[in-house]
Image: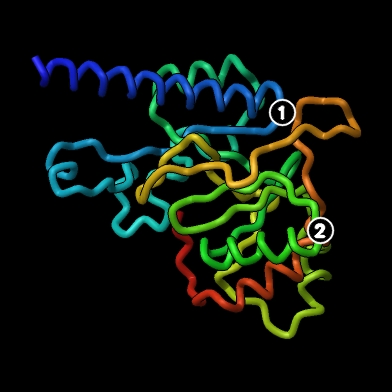
Amino acid sequence: MREILGRRRKLSLQRKERTALLNAALTYAEQWQWRVVPGVGFDSRGSWRAAGAQPCACARPNCPVPGAHPLDPELLAATRDPRMVRSWWTRRPDAPVVLATGDRVSAASLPAVAGARALEAMEGLGVRLGPVVATPTRYLLLVAPYSLAELGELLDSHEWVPTSLRYHGDGGYVVLPPSSSSAGQLRWVRPPLPDERTGGSAPWLPPIGGLVDALVRAGRTAPDGDRLTF
């Protein structure tokens, strides 16, 4: 009897998680007008699960962002159309929510320890932050869209920029809560807040220029590396 009750609770929790992913994807696309697409997800074969691992369903060896990247459909298919979003997540209810960056929203990310330091430093200086996502390994700061030229000018004033610091602009993507990555659950460290200036439901996003210096300083305390993990 205990096993049956435990199984029922597990199934109920899975249904709630799947509903939460669909609802989040619809909020991002329909209400906030952010383009989204399903992530590839994980290989669910029992032999892998028994080993306690969640390899990427794309089957690439050493995938740098296991489960948390687009594959089919590709990133170019990312949309704001709620009908398409509902169709995708109805067919694949466990799929991570991948945000295509560049047109309405962009992002910057850095390792989790450095990200926590950067947030503390910026809040101490009175810098207004937008939404911030914590993955098991990184912090993602969502910002207003920026061009490569604008970013280049901002970074040009620094003698050295750590490669552990990443920028997600046009043609890029990040994964949003309540998705899971291969290492665990994503969560909002700073939840999205409405933009009072427009009266709309889309969150307020800070310009990247006000954050770059703090991000670079914090990034210098984190190990460098060319592997982008989530």
Identify the residue under disc 1: 32
Q: Which mark is residue 147?
A: none
- Picture coordinates of residue 3, whole percent (x, y): 11, 21
For the C terminus, give its image quadrant: bottom left
* Quadrant position of residue 50: top left
Which amino acid, mark 1?
Trp
> Whole-Å distance between the Cαs marked 1 and 2?
26 Å
Q: Residue at x 51, y 76 (%)?
A: 224
Q: Residue at x 48, y 41 (%)?
A: 70
Q: Residue at x 33, y 46 (%)?
A: 56
Q: Residue furthest bottom?
A: 159
For the N terminus, give its image quadrant: top left
Nearer to us of marks 1 and 2 is 2
Q: Counting other residues with Cα less than 10 Å from the Cα at mark 2, is it few (<14), some (14-19), or many (20 or more)?
A: few
- Picture coordinates of residue 43, whole percent (x, y): 27, 40
Q: Residue furthest left?
A: 1
Observer-nearest of 228 and 198:
198
Q: Circle 2 — which element?
A: loop
Direction from residue 181 to residue 25 in the image, left or right: right
Observer-nearest of 200 and 147:
200
Observer-nearest of 78 and 30:
30
Identify the residue under disc 2: 126
Name the colour scheme: rainbow
